[in-house]
Image: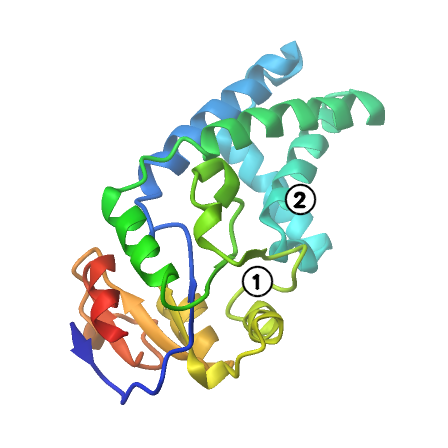
Amino acid sequence: MKFYRPLGPIKAITFDLDDTLYDNHPVIRKTTAESHAALQSFHPALREFTPADYQALRDELLAREPEIYHDVSEWRRRSVELAMINVGLSAAEASAGASEVMSVFHQWRSEVEMPEETHQTLTWLGERVPLVAITNGNACPEKLGIDHYFQFALRAGPHGRAKPWQDMYQLASDRLGIAPEHILHVGDDLTTDVVGSLRAGMQACWINLRDGNLMKIDDARLVPHVEIHQLASLTSLL
């Protein structure tokens, strides 16, 4: 554990989900492969549709509608729908097909091996302060089996612009009725989590699970209050 700024009183803790509470890398690899296979198998004209083709459609959609960046699930659904329309399916067929592919995506997206340390730490912390989940992604705390630890969960898109924009940080503070300076945000990303929460007036904890060096990472624009290397270290801060 390393301290870079003095910590004030902590009356609530907000958490990123992916790569903060669990290792998301194998999950997203499997999810991406399975959902792309579902897309290819939906119609014969899509059998040769490659991940690069899909990425090109995502880029095209983002260029046309920059705000879609803030809702990754809708961005993915619309990209799949566009792929189907481009091979000749009707709008209704493409809409139904996109829903089917997204169902596969969400099924695999929730196949997470949740560490016992995460359960133990969230249980301990939740008995002392309110906890909130704040994510840019499409992981669902209910499907992950961790929703009962949180007062509520916020997701980019339905609840505001993606981190590091301050929308969800401010919403969490408002809904908790706790000033931002008394909330500690915990996350693995130095931009979306550390910079975002600091600019929203919160205290920031960087969870460094991959042995990064804060002084040598390009996107380390602002230093957090504290750096930890395992989630359980949070119990020493209360």
What kind of element bears circle 1?
loop
Check the image and report above or below for 184 versus 211: below
Quadrant of the rendering where the C terminus is positioned = bottom left
How far is the residue under mark 1 from the one under mark 2?
Answer: 13 Å
What kind of element bears circle 2?
helix
Assess disc 2: are there few (<14), some (14-19) or many (≥20) residues with their C-alpha within 10 Å of its C-alpha.
some
Q: How is the image coloured?
A: rainbow
* Image-based side of 119 in relation to 66, left or right: left
Picture quadrant where residue 84 is located: top right
Residue 210 visible in the displayed image: yes
Check the image and report above or below for 8 versus 74: below
Q: Identity of the amino acid at label 2? A: Glu
Residue 90 visible in the displayed image: no
Residue 6 or residue 206, whichever sits in front: 6
The residue under label 1 is 162
Percent coordinates x, y for residue 115 in the rendering: 26, 42
Name the N-terminal-most of marks 1 and 2. Answer: 2
Which residue is most to the top? 44
At horizontal 32% and vertical 40% (from top left) the residue drawn is: 114
At horizontal 27% and vertical 89% (from top left) the residue drawn is: 6
Quadrant of the rendering where the N terminus is positioned = bottom left
Picture quadrant where residue 81 is located: top right
Percent coordinates x, y for residue 24 in the rendering: 35, 43
At horizontal 41% and vertical 37% (from top left) the residue drawn is: 28
Q: Identity of the amino acid at label 1? A: Ala
At horizontal 30% and vertical 85% (from top left) the residue drawn is: 7
Q: Which circle marks residue 217 in the picture? A: none
The residue under label 2 is 74
